[in-house]
Image: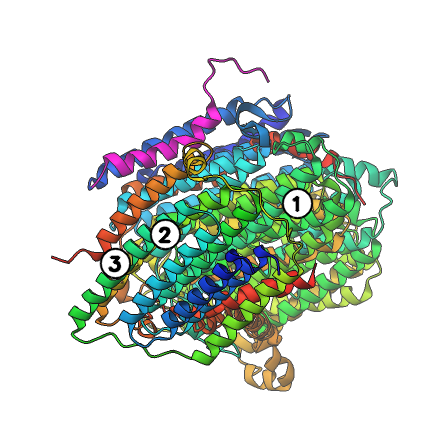
Amino acid sequence: MTLETVGFWVVAALLLVSSLAVVLTPNLFHAVLYLAAALVATGAVFLLLEQPFLFAVQLLLYAGGVVTIVVFAIMLTERLVGERVGQASRHPLNGAIVAAAVFAGIVGFLIQAPIRATAPAPVVDTTASIGRALVGPFAVTLELLGVLLVAALLGALYFARSEE
Amino acid sequence: MTLPTVLPLLVWVLPFAAFVLLAVVAPLRRAGPRAGLLSIGAMGVAFMAALVVWVEDFRGEATWSWIPSDGGPIATVGVLVDPVSNAMLVLVTLVSLLVQVYSLAYLGDEPPASLGRYYTYQSLFAVSMLGLVLSPGFLQMFVFWELVGLCSYLLIGYWYERPAAARAAVKAFWITKLGDVGFVIGIVLLWSATGTFDFGELFAKAQEHALAIDRLGTIMFLIYLGAVGKSAQFPLHVWLPDAMEGPTPVSALIHAATMVTAGVFMVTRAEPLFALVPEVLTLIGWVGAFTALLAATMACVESDIKRVLAYSTVSQLGYMMAAAGAGAADAGFLHLLTHGLFKALLFLAAGAVIHTVGTNDIFRMGGLFRAMPQTALVFIVGTLALAGVPPLAGFFSKEAVLSGVWEAQLTGPFLMLALTALLTAFYMFRVVFVAFFGRAFGAGHPHEAPWLMRGPLWLLAALTVAVGIRLAMGGEHEAPAWLVSLSLALAFAGFALAWAMYQRGVVDPATFASALAPLDFLARRRYGIDALYGGLYRGLVLGFARLIGWIDRYLVDGVLNVLSALTLRGGDGLRRIQNGRPQDYVYGVAFGVLLLIVWAQLWR
Amino acid sequence: MAVGPLTLPILSAITWSPFIGALLIMFTARHRPRAVRWIAVVATGISTLLSIYAYATYNHEAAGFQFYEKLPLVPPLGISYELGVDGISLLMVLLTSIIISAGVFASWTVAVRSQEFYALLLALVTGVYGVFASLDLFVLFLFYELAVLPMYLLIGIWGSSGEVRPRGIFAWAYRETGVGTKEYAAMKLTLYLLFGSAFILVGIFALYVSAGAASFSFLELEAAVFPLGLQRWVFLAFYVGFGILAGIWPLHTWSPDGHASAPTAVSMLHAGVLMKLGAYGVVRVGMGLLPEGAADLAWLVGGIACINIVYGALSAMAQTDLKYVIAYSSVSHMGIVMLGAATLTETGLNGSVFQMFAHGVMTGLFFALVGLVYEKAHSREIEKMGGFGKSMPGIATAFTIGSLSSLGLPATAGFVAELLTFLGTWRSGHRWWLFPAVAGTFLTAVYVLRVTKQIFWGPPSPQFEHLEDARGPEWIALVVLVFVLVLFGMVPGLAIEPVDTATVPLLARIVRP
Amino acid sequence: MSGLQAYLVLAALVFAIGLFGVLTRRNAVGILLGIELMLNAVNINLVAFARFNGDLGGVVFTLFTISITVAEVAVGLAIVIAIFRVRRTVEADRLDLLRG
C-alpha cells in the first residue's frame, strides 16, 4: 500500500459518500453542500492523477461557481414560493435498479476490456503543455467554446429576465 | 384537282362557309331571318353545283393526308365522285334547300336568335351529310357519320326547354352511338387487317380476291351495326319515332329524307365488301324485312301524324336494307332516292297541317281537305307514292326492291315485305281519311300555309310524279308481271281496308282491333322494346354505375381512409408515450444505454 | 443542333417567366389586385408566345431533342440544368401554356388573397414547364416537386368543401379523417403525390447507380444498358410513382376529391396538365429509359388502363356533384392515355400523346365552365340545376363542345386521340383492350350528355332566372380552349407530325416480347 | 485491479449514483445536481485515461467539459426559474407541457 493507494481509497470513499448524500438527502440545500464536497473530492482525484491545474479549475469553477449559482437558484425559488423546497424521492427502487444495471453494464465492459496496466510515464508539469494545446491544436474548439458560453450567457439572461 | 372534283368540293364548301360564318359571327346569327337567307343562299348555289355534277355525270377522286404517321398517312380525307354520290348530292342539297326555305315560314314565330341557331345547325347538317356522301373511305365516312348524328341531336333538341325534346335528342344520340360502337370497332379491325380505310383500295383488293382476312364476316357485321343504329333498323329503331319531338322540317330533312338513309348509303357504298360475306347479307335482308313489318304494324295503331310517318320511314328503311341484303343494292338505292323525295313531301305537308291545326293527333283533325286543298292534294300524292301506286316514283323503286328480294330467293323476307306493302297502304290511307276527310273537328279555322311552305310542297310533288314518269318511260323494270299485279293488289287491299274502316265505317276499327287483340296490344306498346331499353338503362347501366360509384367511394377510397384513420389512431396511441415527464425520458435513455451495452456484449 | 451563344435560351425563358412573374407579384403588387392579374397575364403570355414560337420552329426533319441548353450545377454528382424538348414534350409545353393562359383569365374573379393565389399558381406552372423541358432527372424531380407542393396551399386555402356522408363498413374511418372537406382533399392529394414521388426518387437513384456514369442526364442514361431484372422493378416504380399522378386505378381517389375541392384555375391546371405530367413521366422516363421493362410490363399498364376507362366512366355516371363528374371523367380519359402508351405501337403512342393534349384542353375547358356555373348558380348539385341554356347560352355551347370532345366526336381533338388509340390496341399484343376502350367512349357519351341535358336543357327553374353568361376575361379563356379543341380535331397533323418524330425513335428502342 | 481500472470503476459508481439522482429527484434543481455528478464521473474517466495513456487530449477535454457544464448549469437554472415563474412549481412531474 503506497501512499498513493491509501490516498485513492480515502478520496474514493469521500467521493462516494458525498455523492450518495447528494442524491439521498431530503433537504435540497444540504444536497448542494454535499455536491460541493463531492466536487472537491473529484478535484482531489485529479490531484491523485497528477493534474494540479485541473484541480484548481475544478475548485474555482465547480465548487466555487456552480455551487454558488445553484445556491442562488434555490434561494430564489424558495423566496418566490415562500417555503423550503422539499425533496421526496420518486420511485427510488426503480431508479436504484436502473442505475445499478447501468453500473453493472459498465463494469462488465471494464472487466473484459484489454486495458494496459503499464504505469504511466513520469509526470512533468502539464500546465504549460495544456496551455499550448489550448491555443494550438484545440484553438478552434476553444473559440467555439467561447461562442457557446456567450450564447449560453445570453440564453440564461433571456430565460431568467423578469417580464415587464 | 380537276373540275369533276372541284365542283363537288364546292358543294361541300358552300354550306361549310355558311356554317362557319353563322357560328362565329354572333350578330349575324342573332339576326334570325337574315341568317336563314345566308344559309339558303349557300344551299341554293350548292344545289345548282350538285345539279351540274349530276347532269354532267362527273367522276373522280381527290384525297389529302389527314392523320400523318411515319410510314405515310394513316387516314386521308377527300372527295369520291361517282354516280352514287352524285345522286345523293342532288337529293341532299335539294331536300335541304327546300326544307330551309320551308322553315323560314314554319319557324317564323321563333325569336331571331333561336332561328339563327336553327340555320347554323341546318348548315352544319348539310356539311356533314355532304361530307358523308363524298367520303372516299370508311374513316371520313365515320367522321361525318358522327357529325350527322350530332346535328340530329342538336336539331331534335332545338326546343331544348321542352323536357320531351331534350329526352328524345339524348336518346337518339345514345342509340345511334350504340350502333357506332360496332362501326368503329369494325373499321379499326378492317384497318388493322388491311392497313387502309380507302374504298378504292379495298374494292380493288376485293375484286382481285386479295382480301383474305380472317373474320371478314365479323368485321362487316360490326360495320353494319353502325347502319342499324343510323338507319333505325330493328332493334335500334326506337330513337326515330321519339325524334319527332324536333320541329317538323327537321323531321322531314334528317329523319326521313337524308340522315337516316346514311346507313343504306353506307351499305350501298360498301357493297363490294358486303358481297364477299353472303351470310351477313342474308342477315341484313332478314333484319331489314323484319324491321319493315314491325314498324308498319306500329304505324297502324299510331295516332300522331308525325309518328305514323316516322314508323313508315323505319319501315321503308327496312325495305332498302332488305334490298341491299338481297344483293340488289341498286334497287335499295333507287328506293332511297325516291323515298327521300316523297317522304320529305309527306313530312312537309304534315308540317303544314300541324302548323295550322296546332296538334299532331289525327283524330283531332278531320275534313281538312276543304280547308287546305292544296296541302291535302300533295299529301295524297305522297301517300300514293308511298303506297306504291303507278306511275308515281315509289311504285317502281318498290317493285325493284321486291323483285330483287324474290330473285335472291329470300322467301321469308319477301313475304314480310309484301305484307308490309299492304299495311303501308292501309296506315297511310288511314291518315288520309281520318285527317283530310270525314267530319271537321270544329275548333279553329284551318287555312292554307303561306307560299314559302306551299312552294316546296308543290315542287316535291311534281318531282315525285316526274321521277315516276321518267322511270316508267325508261321501262327498265324487269319485274315479273305477277309481281306487279301482286303489289298493286296489296296496295289496293290496304286502301280498301282503310276506306272501309275510316271512310265508310263498314268495319269498326275497335272490333277489328279486338280481333287482333294480342298484336294490337303489343303494337300499341311498341312491342315493349322501348321499355326494355329504358329498363336496361335504368336498371343495368345506371344501377351498375351506382354500384361502382359506391364501391369507389366507400370501398376503394374506404381502404385508403381506413389506412389514414389507422395512422391517425396509431399516432394517437404513440403520443401517450410522450408523457411530458423529463425523468421518464431519462429512463428511456438509460434503457437505451443498457440495450447498447447488451448488444455490444453479445456481438463482440 | 447548334445553338449560337447569343440565341435566347427559349426553354429557360418559357420555364422561368412565370416564376419571375410570381416574384414580381409577391414583391411589387401588394394590395393591387389589378396589377396582380396583369403581371400574371404578361408572365404567362410570354411563355405562351415563346412556346408557340418554339412549336412553329421545331425542326420536324431532325428528330431528337431541340432548343438544347446545358449548365452544370453539381459536376461531381453529374447534376446539371439541362433542358431540351422533342415532339412529345414540346406538345406538352404548348398544352401547359394554353391551359395556364386560360386559367389566369378564368380565375379573374378570385377575391380572397389574389396576390398569393396568383403567385403560387405561377410558381406551380414553372414546375410544370420544368418537368416537361428537363433532361436531367434530378432537376426534373425538383421541378416535379415544385409542381406538386403549391397544390396543397392552393386547395387548402382557396378550395371549397363538399359533403361526403360516411357509409359502409368503413364509415368510422370517414368520420375520423374528415372526408369531403377541402383540408382533407388537399392533404390527400399532397400525401398521395409525395408517396408517388418517393417511388420516382428511388427509381432515379437506382438508374443513376446502376448506369455507373455518374450522371443524371437523360441522354446519358438512355445510352446505358440496364439488366432486365432491374428494368422491370424500376419501371414498376416509375409506373406507380408517376402513375399516381396520372390517376391509375386504384390509386386514383385523390383526383376526384382534389379536383372537386380545388378552385377553378387549380382544377384546370391539375386535371389539364398535372395529370399529364404523370403520363408523360411514364412515357418519357419509364418507357424511354427502360424499354425492355416497359415491354415486359405493358400488360399491366394496359390492363389497369382498361379498368380506368370503364370504371372511371361508370363512377362518373354515378356522381351527383358536377365537379366530381368531370373529375371522374379525367380518371376515365387518362385510362385512354395510358392504354395508348401500353400498346407500344406508333399509332397507339401517338394517340396517347394526342389524348394527353386533347384531354388537357378539354378538361381545362370543363373545369373553367364548372367554375363559372358554380360561381353564378352557387350549386354543384346536378339535380338542382336545369335550363341554364336559356340564361347562359355561351357557357352551354362551350360545355356542349367540351362534352362532344369528351365522348370522342369527330372534328374535336378527342376523336383523333381515341381513334389512334383504338387503332393501336388492335395491333398491340393484347387485342381485347379495344373493347373496354370503345365501351368507355360509349359510357362517356351516356354520362356526359346526361349531365349536359340536366344542366342546360329543360325548362329553366325560377330559382335560377338571374343567371348571367360568361363575361370579358372569362370569354377569352373559353374561346381559346374551344378553338384549340376544334382546331386540333380538324387538323390533327399539327400535333401528330412533331409527336411522331419523338415516338418513332422511342418505340424503336422497345423490343417487343 | 490496475490503477486505471480502479479509477474507472470509481467513475462508474459516481455515474450510477448521479443517474439514480436524476431518476429519482422530484425537484428540477435536484435533477441538475444529479447531472453534475454524472458529468464529474465522465471527467474522472477522461483524466484517468489521459494520465494512463499519456495523452493530453483528455485533460484538455475535461477543461472544455467543465466550462460547458458551467454554461449548462447557468442555462438550466435559468430555465428552472423561468418555469417556476410561470408554473409556480419546480416539481419535475408537474412540468409536463410536452405531454403528447
Label 3: chain? A
Alpha carbon separation for disc pair 2 and 1: 76 Å
Question: Magenta segment: does it hold D12?
Answer: no
Which dot marks residue C341?
1
| Residue under pointer 2 | A58
Question: At which x and y percent is residue D29?
Answer: 31, 66
Which dot marks residue A68?
3
Alpha carbon separation for disc pair 1 and 3: 77 Å
Label 1: chain? C
* Front-most of residues C34 and B344: C34
Residue sitting at x 61%, y 50%? C336
Contact, mark 2 vs mark 3 (Cβ under 8 Å) = no
Same chain shared by disc 2 and disc 3? yes
Q: Amino acid at mark 1?
A: Ala
Q: Element under label 2? A: helix
* Front-most of residues B317 and B175: B175
Q: For the residue carrying disc 1, how many other residues have a C-alpha within 10 Å: few (<14), some (14-19), or many (20+)?
A: many
Q: Is residue B227 left or right of residue C156?
A: right
Question: At which x and y percent is residue C480?
Answer: 40, 38
Q: Element under label 3? A: helix
Whether residue B134 is situated above or below residue B399 in the rendered picture: above
Q: Element under label 1? A: helix
Q: What's drawn in magenta, residue-wise?
A: C1-30
Select label 2 or label 3 by which is in front.
Answer: 2
Q: Amino acid at mark 3?
A: Thr
**In this view of the protein, can residue A51 be seen by the observer?**
yes
Q: For the residue carrying disc 2, how many other residues have a C-alpha within 10 Å: few (<14), some (14-19), or many (20+)?
A: many
Q: Amino acid at mark 2?
A: Gln
**In this view of the protein, can residue B47 be seen by the observer?**
no
Q: Quadrant of residue C416?
A: top right
Q: Quadrant of residue B58?
A: top right
Question: Magenta segment: does it hold C18?
Answer: yes
